[in-house]
Amino acid sequence: MKMNKLFAMAASMVLCSAVFAGCGTEGGSSSNSGKKSGDKLISVGIINNDPNESGYRTANVNDLKATFTKENGYDAQFAYSLKNEEQINYAQKYIQDEVDYLLLSAADTAGWDSVLKDAKDAGVKVILFDRTIDADESLYEASIVSDMNKEGETAVEWLKNQNLTSYDIIHLQGVMGSAAQKGRSGALTDTASKLNWNIVVEQTAEWNAEKAQQIVQSAIDSNQKFNVIYAENDDMAKGAVAALDRANISHGVGKDVIVMGFDCNKWALQELKAGNWNYDGQCNPFQSSYIVDIIKKLENGETLPQKTIIMDEKGFDASTITDADVEQYGI
Amino acid sequence: MSQNTKNNTASSIITAMFRKQIFIPLAALLILALFNFIMDPSFFKITLGHNSNGDPLLSGNIISIIDYGSELAILAVGMTLVTAASRGQDISVGAAIAISGSVVLRVLCGTNSRPDELQAPIIVAFIISCFVAMACGAFNGVLVSVFKIQPMVATLILFTAGRSIAAWINNNELPVVTDSTFSVFGGYIPGIPIPTPFFIALACFVVIFLVLKFTTLGLYVQSVGINEETSRLNGLNPALIKFITYVILGLCVAVAGLIKVSRISSINYSVVAKDIEMDAILAVALGGNALGGGKFNISASILGAYVIQFLTTTLYKFQVQSDALPAYKAVVVILLVVLSAPIVREKIAALFRKLRPARAEQNG
Amino acid sequence: MQEKSLLEMRGIYKSFPGVKALRNVDFTLREGEIHALMGENGAGKSTLIKVLTGVHVKDGGDIFIKGHGGAVQIRSPQEAQNLGISTVYQEISLCPNLSVAENIFIGRGKGPAVNWREMNKKAGELLDSLGIAVKPNQQLASCSIAVQQMVAIARAVDMECSVLILDEPTSSLDESEVEKLFGLMRDLKKRGVGIIFVTHFLDQVYEVCDRITVLRDGQLVGEYEIEKLPRVQLVSKMLGKELDDMADIKNDIPQYDEARNKIVYEAENLCSSEGIKPFNFRIRKGEVNGFTGLLGSGRSECVRAIFGADKVTSGKVWVDGKQVKINKPIDAMKHGIAYLAEDRKRDGIVGDLSVRDNIILALQVKKGFFRPFSKAQATKFADEYIKLLDIKTASVNTPIKSLSGGNQQKVILGRWLLTHPNYLILDEPTRGIDVGTKVDIQKLVLKLASEGMSITFISSETDEMLRTCSRLLVMRDRKLVGELKGDQLTQNTIMNTIAGGEQK
């Protein structure tokens, strides 16, 4: 009996490790990194969230992987976790490995003070990307972030410029309390109250296409009048469109309902190009060029003009988007 | 005298009704229906319209319920069997749906995640996903039946790893199927105005009822769930029976997974069928089935699943403040579960007895 | 209330849906007496006790308790305890993983802090005063069942109970343990405690009790002084008829002609994982034989090995002259062997399932997965055996767990008879059930054997085996040590064989 249990545990461990091998720490070949004299490679330890978290994250990880290569002069190690404690463990390991740069997209905003102090003492330079943390600015060199509020504002500004005779909006929110939801909801809520836009439905679909479909379906079933779908990500916009199609409500450029999404998935931009949607706001996952820029400046001994760097983020309009945009910005 | 006898029968019918297992989900359904009827009778309105392709279809809240409740109802079938036989629940069904859905898309799309045409027939993709989902079930089943690990702990493994596996199957890509025939399973068959998921669910119910009628599965599962040792001494193989229930649940997962990915012709590994395991377990509980295993009633579980969907649709319909939605759901759930507790039911039944014929006692 | 009464119950009524369990029952318990509560299964003993202990609330009648003027209400076990009523059940309801002392004091502390030293000391004194030989800090699970039972009694005593209910306390004890328990009971009696003793063992009743109350079909038959009620009369009062059946059976030892019938089952060097020595065994058509020996001698393990209930490690087996493999129960069932297990609750009933499902279970498994019985067919089978075995149940849909012990046993017996076995193994089929049913089962065994069924019968009561078996296999220390038949079948020879060589 006891043997059985042990065996079962072993079996499940094997399974787990097999699974996580695909998404766990990579770059085993380069684990003997650290500073080697005469070697010009810059060593970086990159701690990111799980690439399976979302399409955004996948694009983000792929971008970093493509940039920090041996050919480009980097010796990079990657670690992925959605848990803060695990990320901190990875950070400590990289500090012990004496990497030159620690690149961090933290799972949680709190709890990083002591480990970043260790990094500072060890002379490891820390660059935050994608997400900020609650720590003293002196503990890191730079922070490259998306401004979710600005994303929302760009989108709402675009909506305002459509000059509709009336605004009856279905607002599909992401998981409540997430940074993206707060930023993208905030702009719409403010403007709507200022300009007397009518928010017909405001519900969270938790980034989930199917829930969005149900919410819009429910609005249609109860004969709600609306002419704008403001979905805080592409999946939810897609779900909403599925409900519209069922009810034979036309949507897209020059049609009855305006469809807005976020994140610029490639398939979403294709919908945009085809005129089925009207607007898609970017949440830029391509931070590596910014990071490379900062590292170069630091290596040359320059000082950075500001710590927090906000990335350029575009909003695409169905009437102006080009095939080149779809290729370049689609994730 | 005859008056009393009448009263007695009336009260005994009410008492018997309270004891019936299906009473709880039925009562919940009626209460929800009544609530909606009072608040807004148009809730039940069904209209015949056309979709953007010009095909006829019915729409309305009731249609939404039978449509979106399908996956949950299908899962409730398998979850009921698993619960009855192994005295525990499989919490990995959401993750397993992600895996089987991912497999469907992988087969349909091949290596190119956005093909212009399907790389394989849908039936092939579905059959392969069935095998994968049954393998997931078998994995859980072996841990539970052979290694005697508690079901919740055993299925925790797949629960944790499942969505990563799902993403890995498609190389972290998000495949999109453009072929419109694929969307039939989560949408409508052209010309038929009732959503396909409802028919798929119905087919599943028919199959499981036939299985229960023409095999001894029901008796074996209950017997093993109630007393494993006795079952063994009566010639059953308890491990095999538990294992089978997990494989059946795997099959349910594959069907639910097909509907889920068909609905949006794509997949989002981290949110597809999120928390559906909890709803499935709740459906079993709402059906009055003991989560500690033993006797079960599949119809009650299925009804329980639709009650949950009814509740969700009601909350959407009345636009309950979005972040308060789970709280409302929790309150209703607590009420229903408390109501379904045997002790409360006994009390209510006793109350009816008291209210009715106080004199009957003397005559009897 | 009468002068010396501790407890009086007057005109108690209690009914359950479809059953009137108690009708106008009176019961009186006096100070310092041991009072036997007797009746067949379903007579209302358990219900009466449950009313007294607050498990069920009575529908009508009054309960008086000394020191509490007027009628008292008992609505919960807690209230019963507060009134000084304590119960020790057949199944021990203590916590096996705690120590003896903890079990005595659990749930009765006055504050959050526990003074372990003090607790162990007090427990030690209590156990000493009651003459229970166990250390307070010993883990309860490591004590014998008898000691566990006495610990439960010690707990009751320490809670200053005046009424102690012992519900079938002796059914899992051996003789010396029973003696110890009786010593304790007599001791408590001297202290003025009133003891209500529920048992099926007539000997024990006549050994310790002062008074007997007999119930039948939920009604009071009468209350008697023990000297004024001879055994035969007690039995006849319990059954409600003059009983010659017992005498009949005694003279009916089957004269079994060994060589005439063919061998149905034969095993050579059979051995299982449960630590029994390899043994040889055979049984002929129409023969009734039995395994006897002390508790733990391996008699159950032998028949479990025959049925494949435990893992069979070695040995050859022939059924009807053909060599076969029996590794698991289904193999045995396919060869026409049926096994009624010793522990009814653990190995016999499927509690929540209906009587019908319980009856058809084995035959259904034998028939196969894809060939279920229709409900009508199953009901027909169930009705047949309910009638044949005179099972008292409200309907075939009643869950088996709500039946009385004896009726549960009959259902299980019916289950195996339904498979029409050639060879039926009965391991303690009469344990914990009433006299009437016991006699029924013994008669049934003889009847089945006369119809050609081979039966192995195990019982802790030797006279029961003498009444039924034509051959006895004696076990000692997990080893088959002797075979007795014909003239050898007397109490004396059996005792001597069980005890072994040192007995002169």
Image (spheres, coloured by chain):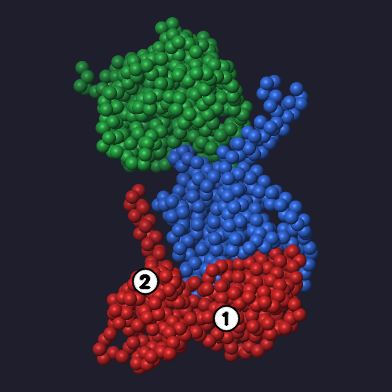
In the image, residue C85 lies at what x, y percent?
A: 44, 24
Q: Nearer the viewer, residue A51 or C309?
A: A51
At x 71%, y 75%, the residue is A196
In the image, residue A95 lies at what x, y percent?
A: 31, 77
In the image, residue C229 lies at what x, y percent?
A: 44, 8
Q: Mark 2 or mark 1: name the one nearer the start of the chain.
A: 2
Identify which amino acid the numbered label 2 is placed on.
Ile
Identify which amino acid the numbered label 1 is placed on.
Glu
Question: Is disc 2 in contact with disc 1, using a CB cutoff of under 8 Å?
Answer: no
Whether B93 is drawn above or below A275: the answer is above
Q: Is residue A260 visible?
A: yes
At x 65%, y 68%, the residue is A202
Judging from the image, what is the letter of the chain drawn in red?
Answer: A
Whether A276 is drawn above or below B17: the answer is below
In the image, residue A21 lies at what x, y percent?
A: 39, 71
Say which mark, if any, is on residue A88: 2
At x 45%, y 33%, the residue is C345
* Quadrant of the image occupied by residue C87: top left
Q: Nearer the viewer, mark 2 or mark 1?
A: 1
Q: Is residue B140 left or right of residue B259?
A: left
At x 31%, y 91%, the residue is A40
**Dot 2: few (<14), some (14–19), or many (≥20) neighbours within 10 Å?**
many
Judging from the image, what is the letter of the chain drawn in green?
Answer: C
Say which mark, if any, is on residue A186: none
Judging from the image, what is the letter of the chain drawn in blue?
Answer: B
**Which secondary structure, mark 2?**
helix
Whether A95 is drawn above or below A4: the answer is below
Residue under pointer 1: A151
